[in-house]
């Protein structure tokens, strides 16, 4: 049975209740989690506050960096163990689970090096004054994490917050907690003080809500759906608590006729099937210039047909979806598309070895998707790619920007001037030209515009969000 991790101890929830942990590859329970409550959150916040006040804020930036580097090395030494946990817990194919563990290593390595490079400025003011700024940690930060990339999102969110000197209370998603509980234990083993990293598991509407409402939380980093992002924002507004929101996406990949198609195809495919399409920055719309629409769809269709889906341990192209309700969600999108007469170009194959009780979905390519159909507007969060065609650059921009989201966009063209024009005109937090990094790049500031959220995580930029700026003005004559 999995326990909460509070003040460097493994503890039972005060609720006395548990939740089953299901393996998405066969739909069967194999472990149990604490179904925590507001009392557990309160205990974790108190542990974090105590840590921050008595220990953590006295640790120098250089020493914090050393601790974070030690944790990075410890995670690297346990990468196989962590990958196996994530593989079972989230249904990730072996390659993906390993990549996520290594990304976590890299986050702690990056933020270890960043700890002692974060500083304020001096400001020229009136004669007789010296004015400067300090970047101070918020204190206790709350981190609400989704199930699709637990290790990666922990790395970018908690890694950045610790580097800036905060103590953290983490609420992983109820479907994906195992790797994070283990990472917190490893942090204690390398010397993180009690209360620096606390993990409390349970349902969002119970324990996530309690975390967002707790008056002892000084900043909330939320990654998840736009719907819950709105709730978090409302709750946080009651006490003016700053929030970073990393929400959903409907990211376009725009292919001009002059693009290097051979280079683009594997990237287009990976951007939608990686993690079974359950990626906020999945390239879920492909916008293709009219002259190459048919030949490119033909090639994409063949690539889709070659994709194989199966249990995580088989390490095929695609694993299962996280749970049955997610599978139902994808089916609903596909049946709506069918009812609207949207043509299907191709589908991959679920292998015979996949248990019927697992949550599988064959990757599906659909064409001529109308811009106002929900397939072109809403996040499916499954391996479903919507193709549309455009006549020219203006129409490409119009279609690309025509959703509530603005997380990532990809542009494929060999025309250098067009690359810059497109990058300027697309409303999106990240733009990739002739490449696409769904979720990738520890160093690259990441976050959205519009309903994709606000604030930035990853890269050095994240550290500004995890600190507050204090201005000190000294009059000395
Ligand atoms: P979700 O919003 O349902 O859950 C996210 C987290 O919020 C979970 O830990 C959940 O338990 C918690 N939660 C749920 N209800 C809550 C409440 N009332 N109060 C507080 N916490 C609550 O999202 P999900 O289904 O876990 O993840 C998929 C979504 O996350 C997609 O929309 C995806 O695009 C988004 N996402 C965004 C990014 C990004 O960086 N922009 C990254 C990954 C996932």
Image (spheres, rainbow, N blue to C red):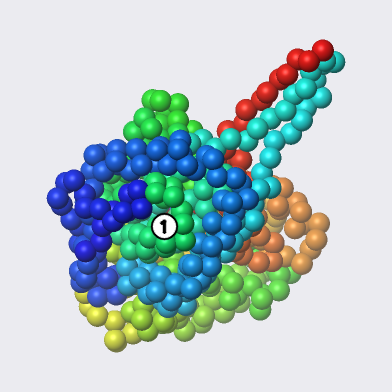
Mark 1, Cα crowd under 10 Å, few <14 / some 14-19 / many 20+, is some
User: Please, is residue 318 above or below residue 8 in the view?
Assistant: below
Identify the residue shown where x is 62% and y is 28%: 470
According to the image, label 1 marks what residue? 188
Give left or right: position of 51 versus 413.
left
User: Please, is residue 278 above or below residue 249 in the view?
Assistant: below
Identify the residue shown where x is 71% and y is 53%: 422
Mark 1 C-beta closer than 8 Å to ligand 1: no
Q: Is residue 378 visible?
A: no
Identify the residue shown where x is 34% and y is 38%: 46
User: Please, is residue 322 above or below residue 445 in the view?
Assistant: below
| Residue lying farthest to the top in this orientation | 477
The quadrant in which residue 237 appears is: top left
Residue 181's spot in the image, x, y percent? 35, 59
Give the position of the C terminus as an image quadrant. Answer: top right
| Residue lying farthest to the left in this orientation | 16
Give left or right: position of 116 versus 414.
left
The quadrant in which residue 210 appears is: top left
| Residue lying farthest to the bottom in this orientation | 352
Give the position of the N terminus as an image quadrant. Answer: bottom left
- The one nearer the camera, 133 or 443, is 133
Q: Is residue 301 visible?
A: yes
> Circle 1 — which element?
helix
Give left or right: position of 120 versus 451.
right
Residue 112's spot in the image, x, y percent? 60, 56
- The one nearer the camera, 276 or 56, is 56
- The one nearer the camera, 378 or 222, is 222
Residue 381's spot in the image, x, y percent? 41, 60
- The one nearer the camera, 462 or 267, is 462
């Amino acid at each position: 049975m999995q326990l909460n991790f509070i003040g460097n101890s493994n503890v039972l929830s005060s609720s006395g209740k548990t939740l089953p942990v299901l393996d998405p590859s066969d739909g069967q329970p194999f472990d149990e989690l604490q179904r925590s409550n507001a009392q557990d959150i309160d205990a974790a916040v108190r542990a974090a506050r105590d840590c921050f006040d008595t220990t953590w804020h006295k640790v120098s930036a250089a020493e914090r960096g050393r601790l974070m580097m030690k944790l990075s090395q410890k995670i690297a030494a346990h990468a196989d163990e962590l990958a196996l946990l994530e593989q079972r817990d989230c249904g990730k194919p072996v390659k993906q689970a390993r990549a996520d563990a290594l990304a976590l290593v890299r986050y702690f390595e990056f933020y270890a090096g960043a700890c002692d490079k974060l500083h304020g400025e001096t400001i020229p003011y009136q004669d007789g004054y010296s004015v400067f700024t300090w970047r101070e940690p918020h204190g206790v930060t709350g981190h609400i994490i989704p199930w699709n990339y637990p290790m990666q999102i922990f790395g970018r969110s908690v890694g950045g917050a610790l580097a800036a000197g905060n103590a953290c209370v983490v609420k992983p998603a109820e479907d994906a907690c195992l790797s994070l509980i283990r990472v917190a234990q490893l942090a204690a083993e390398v010397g993180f003080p009690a209360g620096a990293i606390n993990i409390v598991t349970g349902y969002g509407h119970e324990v996530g809500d309690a975390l967002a409402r707790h008056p002892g939380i000084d900043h909330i980093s939320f990654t998840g759906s736009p719907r819950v992002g709105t709730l978090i924002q409302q709750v946080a507004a009651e006490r003016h608590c700053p929030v970073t929101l990393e929400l959903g996406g409907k990211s376009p990949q725009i292919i001009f006729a002059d693009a290097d198609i051979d280079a683009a195809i594997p990237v287009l495919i990976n951007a939608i099937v990686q993690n079974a399409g359950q990626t906020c920055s999945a390239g879920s719309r492909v916008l293709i210039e009219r002259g190459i629409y048919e030949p490119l769809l033909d090639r994409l269709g063949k690539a889709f047909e070659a994709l194989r889906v199966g249990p995580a341990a088989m390490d095929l192209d695609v694993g299962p979806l996280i749970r049955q309700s997610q599978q139902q969600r994808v089916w609903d999108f596909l049946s709506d598309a069918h009812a609207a007469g949207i043509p299907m170009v191709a589908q991959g194959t679920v292998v015979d070895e996949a248990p019927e009780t697992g949550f599988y979905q064959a990757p599906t390519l659909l064409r001529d998707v109308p811009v106002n159909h929900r397939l072109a507007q809403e996040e499916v969060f499954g391996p479903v790619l919507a193709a549309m065609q455009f006549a020219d650059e203006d129409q490409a921009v119009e279609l690309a920007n025509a959703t509530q989201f603005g997380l990532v966009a990809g542009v494929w063209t060999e025309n250098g001037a067009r690359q810059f024009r497109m990058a300027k005109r697309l409303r999106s937090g990240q733009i990739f030209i002739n490449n696409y990094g769904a979720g990738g790049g520890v160093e690259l500031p990441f976050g959205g515009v519009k309903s994709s959220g606000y604030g930035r995580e990853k890269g050095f930029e994240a550290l500004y969000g995890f600190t507050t700026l204090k201005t000190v003005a000294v009059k000395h004559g």
